[in-house]
């Protein structure tokens, strides 16, 4: 024990200076100076029983906290995770990848061996910054305590500057123990991505005015830019008379789904997605995942289609289709700028004619999707549609964290989710949703007007990190988890049929069924939650109402049909 001011003390002081309240992590020996410093600080440590849980909790926290920050400039919407050297960082890479794809602003750190000891190749060694680099906006290691203030400031700024995302810093043991008289550097304001090139804004407005049947595809960079950006998307849609779709694999609410010009989320199905994008002019706003899960045989967008791209991420502009107008900037500011310009170029009659076309397409799509998630037969289990409908009736205003996988589209097609209500696992790798739901509950606990948090998790996803529930119970978080449980990896069976054809009876589906099934109720109870098995549709609403009325974590294992 020493009274000296060390690198670890400077680290925790910097976090407090930058408005951080929580550090999510799983500690090890090389992190002990940081753990000691946290104990002497006002920071709160949130233990995850696995490093990937810690990163997932930090990611879900950052996503929910970012929504809060859109309305309160004093909030720093960054999740901080501290991991344990090379194996711990390796454990956390799955959800570091998820954070990259979902744009969660994270500062991820890991302890490392002392810089003058690594030549002996002690156990747990690894090139940490190289391991993390592929999934981060910036990845580095602090090799001298004198560099720590600048590198910490840089880490927070890089994580929060659009396009937001994770950064990584390695923190060697000797650097954390080194004495210093340095202080945290001031963070300074974080800029938005700007309002875009005026020439490209004018070009985009001209192309939209000249279009026969304009379509807007909104992506998740819109929601990340704030509720004002979602409102700007509405203004642009109304100014142009365009029909609106959400990008393939959209995981946030980028446009109000109860608006008359909203038609649907684009499906992952190649033929359906291509049909809905078969038009003369498309504006892609803040898109990043707008392609199919596996190789598509034909182009999703006709090469002759006029394409307008706008994003705060220059990499996404013109990436998969040529851009006839390209605007780099804050999606909300850019769309507002285009809307103002296009209003002077279109008559009310033209907009009205376009809206008639929108209504026709909307009616056609709704008729095709009306039965999505419904099931036939004598199976006593709930259909996915019944589960989602019951959830909406009981928890219509809850903050949803979704990794329902094959249940996801029942939710997206049946529930009119509002802006800032919904986040999902955009990265696609299982094991993000449950930890993220725990992190989201931590964030809501800080909010002046907290929402109920509901994790909507498939049984396959839940079983990746069921011990995430321990963290919710340990910190008495108000969280309700609804497991959509069909006791198999349904997505893999569906993809088998899509890729290789045939009927279900043609396949053994090796490794895709949970036989014997895991008792998820006992599992959740063993980690400190209340839990209940719901076997029929008529039990869903009562169980969910009771769970939401109670404080602390609840897990509802709801059996559903395939």
Image: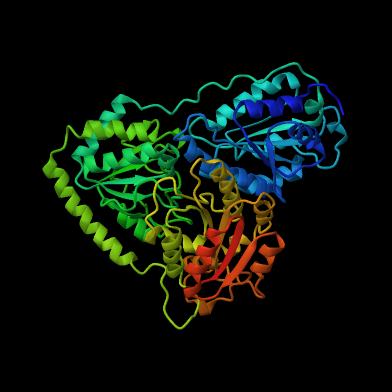
- Examine the rendered structure and indicate whether residue 284 appears above or below residue 562: above
**Total marks drawn?**
0
Image coordinates for residue 70, horizontal then vertical, percent: 45, 35
Which residue is at a point 43% across and 53% down the rendered structure image? Answer: 397
Q: Can the viewer see residue 13?
A: yes
Residue 41 position by quadrant? top right
Question: Quick check: 188 left or right of 336?
Answer: right
x%, y% of residue 122? 86, 39
Q: Tell me which corner region of the image, top left, top right, bottom left or bottom right, holds residue 99.
A: top right
- Nearest the viewer among 439 and 490 is 439
Seen from this angle, which residue lies furthest bottom?
Answer: 378
Which of 69 and 98 lies nearest the eye of the viewer? 69
Q: Is residue 457 visible?
A: no
Q: Is residue 44 left or right of residue 74?
A: right
Q: Is residue 172 left or right of residue 492?
A: right
Scheme of image coloration: rainbow
Please report the residue visible at 80 percent of the width from the left and 39 percent of the height from the top: 125
Instruction: Give the left or right position of residue 72, taking residue 510 as reference.
Output: left
Q: x, y percentage for residue 394?
A: 45, 62
Residue 249 position, x and y percent, is 45, 52
**Residue at point 35%, 38% (across, down):** 309
Residue located at (50% from left, 25% from top)? 190
Q: Residue furthest left?
A: 349
Residue 216's image quarter?
top left
Q: Assign the N terminus to one quadrant of the image.
A: top right
């Amino acid at each position: 024990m020493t009274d000296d001011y060390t690198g670890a003390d400077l680290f925790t002081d910097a976090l407090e200076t930058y408005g951080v309240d929580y550090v999510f992590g799983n500690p090890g020996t090389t992190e002990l100076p940081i753990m000691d410093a946290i104990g002497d600080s006002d920071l709160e440590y949130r233990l995850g029983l696995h490093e990937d849980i810690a990163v997932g909790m930090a990611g879900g926290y950052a996503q929910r906290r970012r929504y809060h920050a859109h309305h309160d400039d004093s909030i720093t919407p960054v999740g901080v995770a501290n991991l344990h050297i090379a194996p711990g960082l390796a454990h956390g890479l799955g959800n570091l990848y998820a954070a990259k794809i979902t744009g969660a602003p994270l500062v991820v750190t890991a302890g490392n061996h002392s810089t003058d000891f690594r030549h002996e190749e002690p156990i747990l060694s690894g090139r940490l910054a190289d391991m993390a680099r592929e999934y981060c906006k910036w990845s580095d290691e602090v090799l001298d305590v004198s560099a720590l203030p600048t590198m910490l400031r840089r880490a927070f700024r890089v994580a929060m500057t659009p396009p937001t995302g994770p950064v990584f810093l390695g923190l060697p043991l000797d650097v954390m123990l080194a004495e210093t008289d340095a202080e945290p550097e001031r963070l300074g304001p974080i800029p938005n991505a700007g309002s875009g090139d005026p020439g490209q804004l004018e070009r985009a407005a001209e192309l939209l005015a000249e279009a026969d049947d304009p379509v807007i595809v909104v992506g998740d960079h819109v929601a990340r830019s704030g509720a004002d950006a979602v409102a700007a998307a509405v203004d642009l849609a109304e100014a142009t008379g365009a029909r609106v779709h959400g990008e393939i694999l959209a995981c946030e609410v980028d446009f109000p789904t109860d608006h008359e010009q909203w038609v649907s989320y684009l499906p992952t199905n190649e033929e359906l997605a291509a049909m809905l994008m078969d038009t003369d002019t498309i504006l892609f706003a803040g898109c990043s995942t707008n392609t199919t899960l596996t190789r598509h045989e034909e182009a999703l967008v006709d090469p002759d289609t006029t394409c307008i791209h706008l994003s705060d991420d220059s990499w996404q502009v013109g990436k998969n289709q040529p851009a006839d107008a390209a605007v780099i900037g804050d999606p909300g500011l850019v769309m507002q700028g285009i809307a103002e310009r296009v209003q002077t170029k279109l008559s009310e009659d033209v907009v009205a004619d376009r809206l008639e076309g929108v209504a026709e397409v909307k009616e056609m799509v709704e008729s095709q999707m009306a039965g999505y998630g419904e099931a036939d037969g004598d199976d006593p289990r709930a259909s996915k549609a019944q589960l989602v409908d019951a959830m909406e009736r009981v928890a219509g205003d809850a903050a949803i964290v979704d990794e329902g996988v094959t249940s996801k589209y029942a939710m997206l097609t049946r529930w009119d989710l509002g802006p800032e209500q919904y986040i999902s696992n955009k990265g696609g790798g299982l094991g993000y949703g449950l930890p993220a739901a725990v992190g989201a509950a931590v964030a809501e606990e800080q909010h002046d007007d907290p929402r109920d948090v509901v994790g909507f998790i498939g049984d396959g996803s839940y079983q990746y990190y069921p011990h995430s529930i321990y963290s919710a119970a340990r910190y008495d978080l108000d969280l309700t988890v609804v497991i959509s449980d069909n006791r198999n990896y349904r997505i893999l069976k569906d993809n088998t049929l899509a890729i290789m054809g045939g009927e279900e009876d043609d396949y053994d589906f090796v490794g895709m069924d949970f036989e014997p099934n895991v008792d998820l109720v006992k599992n959740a109870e063993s980690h400190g939650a209340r839990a209940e098995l719901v076997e029929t549709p008529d039990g869903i609403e009562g169980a969910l109402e009771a769970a939401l009325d109670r404080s602390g974590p609840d897990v509802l294992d709801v059996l559903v049909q395939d």
